[in-house]
Image (spheres, rainbow, N blue to C red):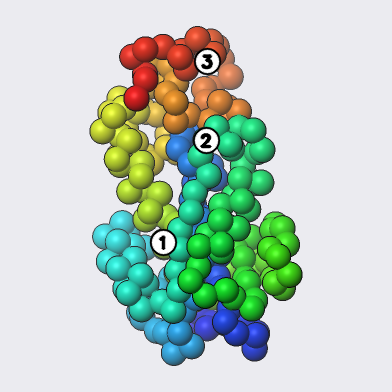
């Protein structure tokens, strides 16, 4: 049973991110403040739901939440500041965009950085424990999937409409065959170690321009 809140300090915002392990695309994060009495049988960690269920529940969250927002940090910034810092930055950006400032923040995972003077608590597997973090995980995941499906139309050979940028065998095979795009994270291990590739040249090749 998911809990409504961590403590008695309200309003409380839940934060989560999506896309940390991907080879391409931004990392997305969401911040959500739910009503105290919010309940729905579908509310769960986004990884436990089907794509159809996530998309259906996204509409419910966006309609019924007291406040919600989604933000992203692109792959070039990820390469500059690393994925952990980029994930936290995306969560801060999402918190900035909330129409109501929270008095307390709960964050999925075990790493975060102080946001203003607002107290926070990191919670390992928080998306399976607290409603607002579960809701944030659903928003971050669905908004990121939507973005990846859109850019898959520009670069169909990477199968992003299916793998959403994660390191599947087909995705890595496409990188080996076609090189990188402006959406790939060049600081990541994009290929298996036995395959060598000149990313600097491939990244600027005309056929991969937007």
Q: Mark 3 points at which residue?
A: 199
**What x and y, as percent, mark residue 138?**
42, 62
Cα–Cα gap, marks 1 and 2: 19 Å
Res. 129 visible in picture: no
Going from N to C along the chain, the mark reached first, 1 or 2, is 2
- Say above or below: 137 vs 153: below
The circle on residue 110 is none
* Image quadrant where residue 181 sits: top left
Q: Mark 2 points at which residue?
A: 75
At a point 37% along the width and 72% down the height, the residue shown is 61
Cα–Cα gap, marks 3 and 1: 32 Å
Count of marks placed on residues: 3
**What x and y, as percent, mark residue 50?**
32, 59
At a point 58% along the width and 68% down the height, the residue shown is 126
The residue tagged with tag 3: helix, strand or loop? helix
The residue tagged with tag 1: helix, strand or loop? helix
* Image quadrant where residue 53 sits: bottom left
* Image quadrant where residue 10 sits: bottom right
**What x and y, as percent, mark residue 171?**
40, 29
Going from N to C along the chain, the mark reached first, 2 or 3, is 2
- Say above or below: 141 vs 157: below
Give whichever of 188, 196 is nearer the camera: 188
Give whichever of 107, 10 is nearer the camera: 10
The residue tagged with tag 2: helix, strand or loop? helix
Q: Name the residue under label 1.
A: 139
**What x and y, as percent, mark residue 91?**
57, 57
């Amino acid at each position: 049973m998911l809990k409504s809140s961590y403590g008695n300090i309200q309003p409380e915002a839940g934060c989560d991110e999506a896309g940390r392990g991907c080879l391409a695309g931004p990392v997305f994060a969401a911040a959500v403040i739910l009503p105290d009495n919010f309940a729905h049988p579908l509310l769960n960690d986004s990884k436990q739901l089907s794509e159809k269920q996530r998309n259906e529940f996204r509409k419910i969250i966006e309609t019924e939440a007291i406040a919600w927002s989604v933000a992203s940090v692109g792959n070039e910034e990820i390469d500059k500041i690393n994925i952990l810092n980029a994930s936290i930055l995306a969560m801060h950006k999402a918190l900035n965009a909330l129409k109501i400032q929270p008095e307390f923040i709960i964050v999925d995972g075990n790493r975060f950085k102080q946001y203003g003077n607002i107290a926070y608590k990191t919670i390992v597997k928080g998306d399976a424990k607290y409603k607002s973090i579960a809701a944030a995980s659903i928003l971050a995941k669905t908004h990121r999937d939507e973005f990846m499906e859109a850019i898959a139309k520009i670069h169909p050979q990477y199968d992003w409409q299916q793998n959403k940028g994660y390191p599947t065998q087909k995705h890595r095979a496409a990188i080996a065959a076609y090189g990188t795009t402006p959406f790939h994270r060049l600081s990541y291990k994009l290929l298996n170690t036995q395959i060598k590739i000149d990313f600097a040249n491939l990244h600027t090749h005309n056929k991969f321009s937007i």
